Image (cartoon, coloured by chain):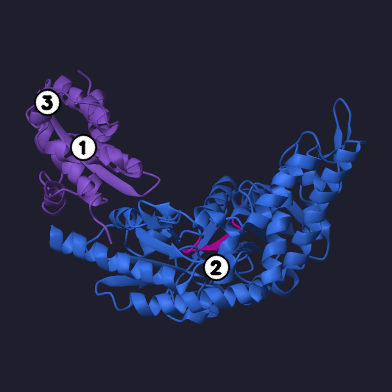
């Protein structure tokens, strides 16, 4: 058995978010609700966002999926809470680039916090969709909200 | 049975630094070089369109293409090659029955019966047909071990039932269904039976006359053949009254400005230039399997499943779905390991050279029945060995330790 390569994918910070997800649950009916799934593997996310003008005041998620998809959702909600919608969308953009294995500006990596731990996913093409599910849901949510 | 491994050059490689263990044959099987050689030879020497050329290559291509149809006929013991229609695969075969026979015969209030263990390809066509015709879609209940009893079948089929569509072997539970007995009950109520044999044809002998199946579909790529070729078997009388689904070249008898007539069976269902190389490759796969003997293949997989069940049972926290009796199941095992999501499990195993499937296996209603969103599946074929299972078991133990102890 070899686990060296796996350690690039599974970091303790990822497993920590998987086992103890942050912002788990659902916000009230006044929030923006997005349901998304990954039809090829069955992962699904239920994301609720509380928007106040341009600010993402709160975010909660619920769902089912692997450690990558659920930890990514947990990290994403942490990263965008209190942020401006445009900032959140920029983070989603940065995250997509991260999944493509592109170089990311160090300052933004710092801002993203735990999200940076998912960088290793880029080396596992079959798992990229797991990681991006929550971000796609968030993008949809903030774009749908009429401004 | 390791004597067959040498026929599958793909198996002789390392994946992520480990010798490949391929345990995903239920998704698609590997192809023996005997099949690959035949396809190569066809393109090298005979490639031409079928049924239209006067020239020699056209004749050779047509002979091989139609020769394969005879091999398919013999393989499932159909009465005539008129009953063998080439399709893209099981999905197309089943859709053809739903939109051909189904649309012509199902009316408002009629019943269509399927089971909870159906693959989406034997579920959605019937769901859509039922919606269109305002017919009633009924599901055969499963027992706790993932089997269907004849009592359930008797209690579900009524005189209003027009179609019973069921899988011969489940791609998730591994359950082998008593098709012959179900057909008898269906026929007693005037219904027809449509059999999804995608997971059966590669692994066990099939005799459509003995089963008394009205329609039966399977795919070439799960039985050593190429992708993009499959078969729809139908009783001649039923196919005869069925209208073509696709119109165009190849399938016509005579075309006038406002009217056309169709070729006879089976060609009226084969519009357009067919997958000639695929059909020929399927014929070669049938030759290959027939030479080994379907009984021998079934026995080999049986042994592997029995061994795998026994070894996997020793791993704590591992749950196995489907019947416990190896005699009731085909060569696959679907399972979950406590605390490790199937996708994570599949990644860990892949890093150790072991290919398994993880996900909902195109059977979401069944996943709901099992109360899980995803499962892992290991499936076996002629080229697999007990050593492969040992590698799997070692991998599962490693994954369990990795996720439970490292983090």
Q: Quadrant of the N terminus of chain B?
A: bottom right
Q: Are marks 1 and 2 in contact (CB under 8 Å)?
A: no
Q: Name the residue carrying label 1.
A: A119
The answer to whether marks 3 and 2 sit on the same chain is: no
Mark 1 or mark 2, whichever is nearer to me: 1
Mark 3 or mark 2, whichever is nearer to me: 3
Q: Is residue B117 magenta?
A: yes
Q: Is residue B239 above or below residue B42?
A: below
Taking the image as shown, residue B120 lies to the left or right of residue B298, namely left
Callout 1 secondary element: helix
Q: Name the residue carrying label 3.
A: A106
Q: Position of residue A9 (x, y in %)?
A: 23, 46
Magenta residues, start to end:
B108-118
The answer to whether marks 1 and 2 sit on the same chain is: no
Chain label for disc 2: B
Q: Is residue B113 magenta?
A: yes
Chain A rendering hue = purple
Between the residue at mark 1 and the residue at mark 3, the CA separation in whole angstroms equals 13 Å
Q: Position of residue B51 (x, y in %)?
A: 86, 41
Q: Are marks 1 and 3 in contact (CB under 8 Å)?
A: no
Q: Is residue A109 visible?
A: yes
Q: Is residue B233 above or below residue B262?
A: below
């Amino acid at each position: 058995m070899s686990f060296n390569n796996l350690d690039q994918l599974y970091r303790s910070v990822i497993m920590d978010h998987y086992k103890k997800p942050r912002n788990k649950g659902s916000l009230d009916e006044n929030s923006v609700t997005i349901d998304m799934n990954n039809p090829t593997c069955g992962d699904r996310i239920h994301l609720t966002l509380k928007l106040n003008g341009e600010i993402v005041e709160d975010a909660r998620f619920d769902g089912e999926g692997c450690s990558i998809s659920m930890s990514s959702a947990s990290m994403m909600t942490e990263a965008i809470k209190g942020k401006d919608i445009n900032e959140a969308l920029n983070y989603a953009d940065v995250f997509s680039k991260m999944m493509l294995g592109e170089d990311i500006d160090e300052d933004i990596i710092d801002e993203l916090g735990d999200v940076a731990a998912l960088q290793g996913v880029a080396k596992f093409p079959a798992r990229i969709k797991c990681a991006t599910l929550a971000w796609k849901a968030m993008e949809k949510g903030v774009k749908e909200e009429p401004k | 049975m390791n004597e067959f491994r040498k026929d599958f050059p793909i198996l002789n490689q390392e994946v992520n630094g480990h010798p490949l263990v391929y345990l995903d044959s239920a998704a698609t099987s590997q192809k023996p070089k005997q099949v690959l050689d035949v396809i190569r030879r066809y393109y090298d020497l005979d490639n031409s369109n079928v049924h239209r050329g006067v020239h020699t290559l056209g004749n050779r291509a047509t002979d091989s293409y139609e020769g394969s149809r005879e091999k398919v006929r013999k393989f499932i013991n159909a009465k005539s090659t008129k009953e063998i229609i080439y399709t893209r695969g099981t999905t197309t075969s089943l859709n053809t029955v739903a939109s051909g026979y189904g649309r012509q015969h199902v009316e408002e209030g009629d019943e269509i019966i399927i089971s909870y263990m159906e693959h989406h390809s034997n579920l959605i066509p019937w769901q859509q047909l039922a919606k269109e015709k305002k017919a009633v879609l009924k599901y055969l209940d499963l027992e706790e071990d993932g089997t269907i009893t004849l009592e359930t079948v008797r209690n579900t089929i009524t005189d209003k039932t027009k179609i019973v569509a069921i899988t011969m072997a489940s791609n998730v539970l591994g359950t082998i269904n008593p098709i012959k007995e179900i057909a008898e009950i269906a026929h007693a109520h005037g219904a027809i039976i449509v059999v999804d044999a995608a997971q059966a044809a590669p692994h066990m002998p099939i005799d459509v006359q003995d089963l008394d199946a009205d329609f039966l579909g399977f795919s070439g790529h799960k039985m050593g053949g190429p992708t993009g070729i499959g078969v729809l078997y139908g009783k001649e009388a039923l196919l005869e009254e069925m209208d073509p689904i696709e119109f165009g070249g190849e399938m016509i008898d005579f075309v006038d400005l406002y009217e056309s007539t169709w070729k006879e069976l089976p060609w009226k269902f084969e519009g357009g230039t067919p997958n000639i190389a695929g059909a020929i490759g399927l014929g070669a796969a049938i030759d290959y399997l027939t030479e080994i003997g379907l009984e021998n293949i079934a026995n080999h997989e049986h042994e592997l499943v029995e061994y795998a069940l026994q070894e996997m049972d020793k791993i704590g926290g591992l749950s196995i779905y489907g019947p416990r009796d190896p005699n009731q199941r085909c060569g696959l095992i679907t399972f979950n390991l406590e605390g490790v999501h199937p996708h994570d499990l599949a990644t860990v195993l892949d890093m150790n050279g072991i290919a398994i499937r993880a996900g909902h296996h195109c059977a979401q209603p069944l996943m709901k029945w099992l109360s899980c969103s995803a499962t892992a599946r290991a499936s076996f074929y002629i080229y697999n060995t007990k050593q492969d299972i040992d590698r799997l078991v070692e991998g599962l133990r490693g994954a369990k330790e990795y996720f439970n102890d490292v983090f």
